[in-house]
Image (tube, rainbow, N blue to C red):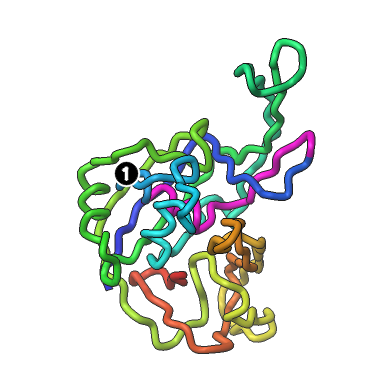
Amino acid sequence: MKALKFTLKGQTAFFKKPDVNTYLYFTYGNIHKIAVLGILGAVLGFGGYNQQDKEAIYPEFYDKLKAIKIAVVPLNERAYIPKRVQKFNNSVGYASKEAGGNLIVTEQWLEKPRWEIYVELNNNIYGEKILDSFKNNKFVFMPYLGKNDHFADIDDVEEVELHECREVNKIHSLFLKKYFEILNNDSLDLFDEEEITWKYEERLPVALEESTNQYITERMVFTNACVALKEEYDIYSTGDKNLFLF
């Protein structure tokens, strides 16, 4: 299977969680599928939430790209991305009912995030257009990481061949936890080089709910532990990485 591979990074990122606190807006700890589809949509010139018609079920980018499968490989060590709380003023006239119309916004930003992104091309009617746009830097809109304060840097663009794996004991990308059993250290070969086992786990958006466009989230994991499939699911390999496309 052919896929687009690229490195996605930035100085900061903000993937807003919907459970908003009055004083502080929180971010997800890693990029999620809806945000990746949003970047693809920006590249192709598809409309987002602000351009969505009242009659439309989904924003244009999601309606056209939701069937695309992607894989996300965190490049920050153990998928941990430092967070920092930022305060800034929103001084547009309608921002606040307070005197002067000045609203102080407090957000939690990710610092220096980096990912390797894979996008399937074979079963994707926009595959050739996506590949051409990325290879030739022909972006209709500027891609960003969550919101337009956080510009996205896209590097190392290439077309790769993915091969289906028959036996899998490790996954090198984020994966849906429900499909796998994470094995204990006891199951590892005692003669292997000793390695500390680590795991990142978070509920991340994987789809939009039809009637409200709210996020549908699933538990996702990134780990160096051995895993075993609990049910049949196609896993693909680039040669040095086993990828979970979803």
Residue 103 painted magenta: no
Q: Nearer the viewer, residue 195 or 91?
A: 91
* In the image, farthest residue toward the top: 100
Q: Is residue 34 magenta?
A: yes
Question: At 62% across and 78% down in the image, what residue appears?
Answer: 178
Residue interval drawn in magenta: 22-40
Up-down relation of residue 221 to residue 43 (above or below)? below
Write down the quadrant of residue 71 in the picture: bottom left
Residue at x 66%, y 20% (from the top left corner): 89
Say which amino acid is labelled 1: Gly
Determine whether, in the image, residue 152 is placed left or right of residue 3: right
Characterize the local packing of mark 1: few (<14), some (14-19) or many (20 or more) Cα atoms within 10 angstroms. Answer: some
Q: How many marks?
A: 1
Q: Is residue 190 left or right of residue 56?
A: right
Report helix, strand or loop for mark 1: loop
Residue at 58 percent across and 61 percent down: it is: 211
**Residue 198 left/right relative to 113:** right
* Residue nearest the viewer, comparing 187 with 42: 42
Q: Which residue is mark 1?
A: 45
Q: Toward the viewer: 50 or 163?
A: 50
Where residue 191 appears, as percent x and y from the top left, is 58, 82
Say above or below: 34 vs 8: below
The relative height of residue 116 versus residue 95 in the rendered view (above or below) is below
Residue 95 spot, x, y in % from top left: 66, 23
